[in-house]
Structures are given as structure tokens and as C-alpha cells.
Image: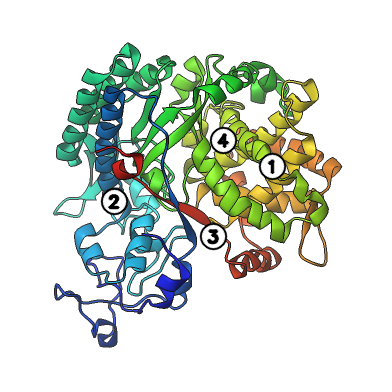
């Protein structure tokens, strides 16, 4: 459903009934005065929420599949079917209530569309605040843990797999905590998804793609994903790809332990992928040049990492929730990363949609006129690409015996890692331009486009990993004079100070990661992880100009011409 001003202007405020659960508050009788056709009570939008319903620009997600064989197109259809299952599973992880009842009580199409985008009643691009009355703030642990569980209770719970990526925690009749593996809790859905992957595997003529699909199907039933991660890295010449399963941990804002189900169905852009091959080979040299003491860059990134460009043809689950991902760096398993590197997948058609519909309009409002010519798609693509490459740089294990960086930093691990990738990506661009390896454009293109990109990403809200990372970087840049704001509320990059700030923030983040400094990261987020009044006023100008915050894709077999 396309969200537009006409739709929202016709919107009534009665939209949704109250769901059960400890996260809900009782509504007054006035809120329940309207019922749906099914006889379910309807509730009321939070004041002002009607103005949020059109923050997503609707875009048709299509791609030219004419170069694919009939079997390859059939495989894409099967992968989309499996992705729909991932979508349903993510709903169960994100929303601690009954999805069918939740959606059945929403009357207006615009509100239904907004709820589908957010996978529940919380606005993901407004710090997960409820947009429907009767709901308290979203549980930090989503539906991975009991809503009433404290960190202290979790820490006291004796369990070998409580912090596993692939378990949820529940209470028994006595109120005690216990764990359930994904493969058990979601057994029926995962079996259907596995069967679809196996059918797709039987159709492909690419043996390594077949192996990956078979191993991923097996992983659904066993929660053992490492072998399929290695198999995914081993396949390099397939035109079709799928990233599917429980992968990222951003939805778990309590600890950052639990993986969310998602999927991307991809078709490789072979021409653009060929252009990117050289950059993956630069990782070892870039690691040696990081602006940090030797101990913090002693780990050697895998030299077999890959850079590819794709047309994305379907998003599902976590990847489809709220803001849409435009580049992916996987696998997350640190052991696999060190052994094989990672694959950085650039989603070219999704990038173009955001650049044309969002980034350029933002620059017209917030960047000084004399620097707007430095806003280019090539720079946007490269900054995004090197962000993903930079995930392979730095350090994965702490220097003081605190285990992996992810384990030591817990809920801060993901946002700090995103901040590291952003700033090291810009460090890489600077290095590669100076060495003549990167030849498109000039350094000012990348710096100015990067600054405009901060304004784009920070609108996602401080609750997202990317949003928090952007706020830390924006406030650090402001402190170091990396940009200047004029009296018209327009920003200009100071090239010399920006260069110094890139090095300084790179060192700060790498030290925090290497030290596993949980308290230090907490202080950094407390000091710099928030949107100040001046910046908020500038962001409000973007809203007044009706610039969308992000895109929402109308997608599926119909959009691809697959019947």
C-alpha cells in the first residue's frame, strides 16, 4: 500500500484494539467505542502519529530477470516463498502478541501498511515509541525474553545456552526461566522453509549453490549454521543468491544476543561486481595502516573476502522492518570471518531508490549550495560499500581476555560496530584515493556525501544501531569542527578537520572494542548518542519539506513477472 498525504488526510483515528500482555495498559471506555466488522474493539492512534504514516516512500521493487533461465526464475519463486516464512517468524520474534488479532483490528489501509512496515505497534524510526494508544514502550528484548525479566535475573539464571543466538527464554508454570531452541519453537515453519530450499537446490545447476541451500535447510532443523556459512562463502559464481535465516541481533536491544529471522533474495549484477573485485584485495594493507597501536590491529582479516553488487528482488523479516538495508556484510561468525573473510553485498537498486528519493532532497535543504555538486551516487555507493568492507577491519577478540568484542560489549556491540564500519569506511576511501586505487571522483565528493548521509540515517531514530552510531559520529564531528553550520542552518564540510576527525574517532572506537570496555562505551553513548535541539530543528525542516525518511518496497512475484 502506498502511503500518501491523501490517504492519511482521510484517516480516522480509530485503528486498533488492545492486545493482551504485560506491555499493555488499559484503555478508557471512550477508546473502545468503535468496533471492527469482526466485532473487535478498536483503539486510538497516539496524538501526532497520523503525521508519521507517510514517512516511507513507496517504490516498486523490480528487476530484469530475462537473462535467467526458466529454472532459475523458478528458484527465485521458491526462495521468495521461503522468505515469506522468515517474515512470519520475525513477526513472532518482534511482537509479543497475536499478529492476526492485531492486524484484524486495524481498519484503515494506511495504518495497516504502517503496522506491517513496523511489525507491530511501535514506530521503528521514532525510537520504538508506540504509535497506538494502550501500548507501553517496546520491550528491549522484543519477544526473545519474558517482558518482566530483568538483566539481573538473566545473569543469575544458570544455563549453558541462555546467550545462544538461537534460543528464546520463557517461564514455566512455577515462573522459572528456561530456554527453547529456535528449531524446536518454530519447528513446523522451519521444516516448510527447509523443504522449499531443498526443492530449489534440486533445480540449480550450480553445485556450490546447491550445497549451500542443502546445508542451510539442515541448519533450520538443527540450529547449527556454521557449515552453511562456510558453504555460502565458498560459492562465488552463482547468479542467484539468498541470505536467509536467523542472522542479525539488532532486534535484541536488551543484550544483543538473539538472532532475528530475515531474508534477501538477490540477483548478481556481474558487470558492477567485476569492478569491485580489486577493493577486497586491499584489506590486509588497510588493516596495517589503521590509526591505532599495533596490538589493536594484529588480527589479520581474511584475504578471500568478496565484494559483489546485486539487484535485490525480495526483503523479508528483519531486513524488511522499518528502514531498508542497502548493503550487507556477512557472515557474522567471527571464526568464519577470520578464516574466509566476508561477502559484502551491495544492493544497487535499493541504493539508487534512496539516493534519488531521499539523499539528494536532503542535500538541497541542509548542505550549502557550493558543496551540493559533491553529492554523487558513485560516492554514496562507495561510502556504503566501504562501510561493509570495514566490518572486516579492526579487532574481533578483546586484548584482555574478555572474549569476543560482541560478548564483552553486549547490547552496545552492534551499534559500536556500525559506528566503526562507518568511520573506517571513510578512512578507507581516503587511503584508497590517495593511493590511486579508487579513481572515481575526488575526496570532497565522499566527505560531503557522507555528511548528507548522516542526516539521512539519523532520521532512523536513536533506537536503531545505525541511528545511535550516526549520532555519536555527528556529535564527535561537531566537537572536532569537521563541519560548519551557517546561519541558514546549512552545513559545509571542513576538509582538514574532517580528515583529523576520521582518524581520531577510528582510534577511539577501535580501542574501546579491543579493550572490551563496556563502561567506556556506555559513557560514549550517554555523552554523544543523542539528538540535540539544534539538529532536531534541522531534521524537522526535512519533515516540513515532506522528504521521506525511508523507502518501502512493493515487492513479490507479481512485481517480478513471476507467475
Could you tell me how far apart the alpha carbons at marks 2 and 3 are, in whole angstroms?
25 Å
Q: Which residue is mark 3?
A: 548
Q: Secondary structure at mark 1?
A: loop
Q: Quadrant of the N terminus?
A: bottom left
**Outermost residue to the top:** 207
Foreground disc of the pair 1, 4: 1
The reply, left or right, for residue 379 in relation to residue 21 is: right
Whole-percent x and y of residue 424?
A: 66, 33
Q: Residue at left 32%, top 67%?
A: 109
Label 2 vs label 3, nearer the camera: 3
Q: Using the image as rendered, state which of residue 162 and residue 440 is in the foreground.
A: 440
- Which residue carries the number 2 mark? 91
Separation of residues labelled 4 and 3 (CA atoms): 37 Å
Are discs 3 and 1 less than 8 Å apart at CB?
no
Q: Answer with mark 4 or mark 3, whichever residue precedes in sequence.
A: 4
Q: Earlier in the sequence, mark 1 or mark 2?
A: 2
Q: CA distance from mark 1 to mark 2?
A: 37 Å
Look at discs 4 and 3 and give the one toward the viewer: 3
Q: Which quarter of the rendered picture does the C terminus lie within?
A: top left
Within 10 Å of disc 3 (Cα), the crowding (few <14, some 14-19, many 20+) is many
Q: CA distance from mark 1 to mark 4?
A: 37 Å
Which residue lies under the disc numbered 1?
376
In the rendered structure, which disc, 2 or 3, sits on the residue that comes first in sequence? 2
Label 4 close to label 3 by CB (< 8 Å): no
The number of numbered badges drawn on the structure is: 4
Q: Is residue 480 shown left or right of residue 361?
A: right
Task: Kindly report the distance in space between the C-alpha atoms of the residues bearing marks 3 and 1.
Answer: 19 Å
Reading the image, the residue beneath label 4 is 516
Picture coordinates of residue 373, whole percent (x, y): 77, 47
Amino acid at each position: 500500500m502506498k502511503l500518501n498525504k491523501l490517504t492519511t488526510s482521510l484517516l480516522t483515528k480509530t485503528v486498533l484494539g488492545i492486545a493482551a500482555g504485560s506491555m499493555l495498559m488499559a484503555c478508557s471506555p471512550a477508546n473502545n467505542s468503535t468496533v471492527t466488522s469482526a466485532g473487535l474493539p478498536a483503539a486510538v492512534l497516539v496524538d501526532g502519529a497520523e503525521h508519521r504514516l507517510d514517512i516511507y516512500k513507496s517504490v516498486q521493487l523490480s528487476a530484469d530477470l530475462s537473462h535467467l533461465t526458466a529454472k532459475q526464475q523458478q528458484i527465485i519463486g521458491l526462495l521468495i516463498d521461503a522468505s515469506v516464512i522468515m517474515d512470519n517468524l520475525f513477526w513472532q520474534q518482534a511482537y509479543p502478541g497475536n499478529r492476526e488479532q492485531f492486524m484484524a483490528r486495524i481498519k484503515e489501509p494506511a495504518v495497516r501498511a504502517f503496522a506491517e512496515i513496523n511489525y507491530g505497534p511501535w514506530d521503528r524510526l521514532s525510537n520504538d515509541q508506540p504509535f497506538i494508544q494502550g501500548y507501553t514502550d517496546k520491550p528491549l528484548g522484543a519477544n526473545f525474553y519474558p517482558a518482566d525479566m530483568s538483566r539481573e535475573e538473566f545473569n543469575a539464571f544458570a544455563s549453558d545456552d541462555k546467550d545462544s543466538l538461537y534460543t528464546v527464554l520463557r517461564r514455566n508454570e512455577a515462573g522459572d526461566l528456561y530456554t527453547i531452541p529456535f528449531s524446536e519453537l518454530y519447528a513446523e515453519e522451519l521444516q516448510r522453509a527447509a523443504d522449499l530450499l531443498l526443492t530449489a537446490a534440486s533445480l540449480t545447476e550450480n553445485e556450490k549453490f546447491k550445497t549451500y541451500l542443502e546445508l542451510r535447510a539442515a541448519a533450520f532443523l538443527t540450529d547449527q549454521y556454521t557449515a552453511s556459512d562456510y558453504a555460502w562463502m565458498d560459492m562465488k559464481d552463482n547468479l542467484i543468491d539468498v541470505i536467509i535465516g536467523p542472522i542479525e541481533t539488532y532486534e535484541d536491544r536488551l543484550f544483543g544476543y538473539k538472532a532475528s529471522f530475515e531474508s534477501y533474495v538477490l540477483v548478481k549484477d556481474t558487470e558492477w561486481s567485476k569492478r569491485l573485485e580489486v577493493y577486497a584485495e586491499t584489506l590486509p594493507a588497510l588493516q596495517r595502516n589503521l590509526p591505532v597501536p599495533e596490538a589493536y590491529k594484529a588480527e589479520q582479516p581474511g584475504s578471500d573476502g568478496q565484494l559483489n553488487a546485486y539487484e535485490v528482488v525480495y526483503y523479508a523479516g528483519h531486513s524488511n522492518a522499518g528502514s531498508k538495508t542497502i548493503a550487507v556484510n556477512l557472515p557474522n561468525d567471527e571464526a568464519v570471518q577470520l578464516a574466509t573473510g566476508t561477502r559484502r553485498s551491495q544492493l544497487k537498486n535499493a541504493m539508487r531508490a534512496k539516493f534519488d528519493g531521499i539523499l539528494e532532497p536532503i542535500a538541497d535543504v541542509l548542505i550549502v549550495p557550493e558543496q551540493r555538486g559533491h553529492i554523487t551516487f558513485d560516492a554514496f555507493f562507495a561510502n556504503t560499500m566501504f562501510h561493509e568492507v570495514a566490518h572486516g577491519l579492526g579487532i574481533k577478540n578483546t586484548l584482555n581476555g574478555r572474549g569476543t568484542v560482541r560478548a564483552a560489549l553486549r547490547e552496545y556491540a552492534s551499534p559500536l560496530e556500525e559506528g566503526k564500519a562507518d568511520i573506517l569506511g571513510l578512512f578507507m576511501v581516503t587511503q584508497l584515493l590517495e593511493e590511486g586505487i579508487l579513481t572515481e571522483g575526488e575526496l570532497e565528493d565522499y566527505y560531503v556525501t557522507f555528511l548528507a548521509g548522516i542526516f539521512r540515517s539519523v532520521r532512523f531514530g536513536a533506537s536503531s544501531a545505525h541511528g545511535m552510531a550516526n549520532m555519536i559520529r555527528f556529535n564527535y564531528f561537531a566537537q572536532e569542527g569537521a563541519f560548519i553550520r551557517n546561519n541558514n542552518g546549512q552545513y559545509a564540510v571542513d576538509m582538514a578537520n574532517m580528515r583529523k576527525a576520521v582518524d581520531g574517532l577510528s582510534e577511539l572506537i577501535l580501542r574501546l572494542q579491543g579493550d572490551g570496555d563496556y563502561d567506556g562505551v556506555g559513557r560514549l553513548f550517554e555523552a554523544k548518542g543523542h539528538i540535540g535541539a539544534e539538529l532536531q530543528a534541522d531534521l524537522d525542516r526535512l519533515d516540513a519539506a515532506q522528504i521521506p525518511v525511508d523507502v518501502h518496497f512493493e515487492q513479490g512475484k507479481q512485481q517480478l513477472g513471476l507467475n
